[in-house]
Amino acid sequence: MSTAKVARVKLYNNKLKAGFLDYEIDDDDVILPTEAVGSLSLNNGDEVSFEVTKKGDKHYATNVKVVKSK
């Protein structure tokens, strides 16, 4: 069974290649780190599938794939 989730890119910084997803866990947005983005070209509003990894008290997206570009 897949643990992949789908959400929209809430805020993305092309220069940093990092941002946040419009998906909350415990009232905190899931962070979209640079290493999860890789060579993907993302924009605010794009729909992505991802898995979540918890590090400390923060949740990070991993295995990010574009489902639908805005």
Image (tube, rainbow, N blue to C red):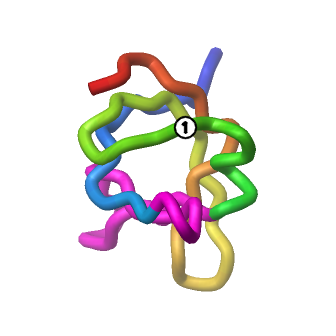
Decide whether the magenta segment is chiefly helix, strand or loop.
strand
Q: Residues within 10 Å of mark 1 (few under 14, many from 20)?
A: few
Estimate the x, y position of residue 9 in percent, counting from the top left. 34, 46
Callout 1: SS: loop
> Image quadrant for the C terminus?
top left
Q: Which residue is mark 1?
A: 41
Quadrant of the rendered image containing residue 41: top right
| Residue at the (55%, 28%) spot, across then down | 4
**Side of 24 where 18 appears, left or right:** right
Foreground pick, 52 / 11: 11
Q: Residue at x 66, y 62 (%)?
A: 34
Q: Position of residue 19 (x, y in %)?
A: 44, 64
Q: Which residues are magenta?
A: 14-33
User: What is the number of callouts on the image?
Assistant: 1
Q: In the figure, 9 relative to 19: above or below?
A: above
Determine the image quadrant of residue 69. Answer: top left
Q: Position of residue 58 (x, y in %)?
A: 53, 77
**Magenta includes 24?**
yes
In the image, what residue type sits under mark 1? Ser
| Horizontal side, residue 53 vs residue 59: left or right | right
In the image shown, does 37 or 30 lie closer to the viewer? Answer: 37
Classify the position of the N terminus by image quarter: top right
The single residue placed furthest to the front in the displayed view is: 15
Q: Residue at x 37, y 18 (%)?
A: 68
The image shows residue 56 at horizontal and vertical percentages of 64, 84
Question: Nearest the camera: 25 or 69?
Answer: 69
Residue drawn 73% across the image and 46% down it: 38
Q: Nearer the viewer, residue 28 or 10?
A: 10
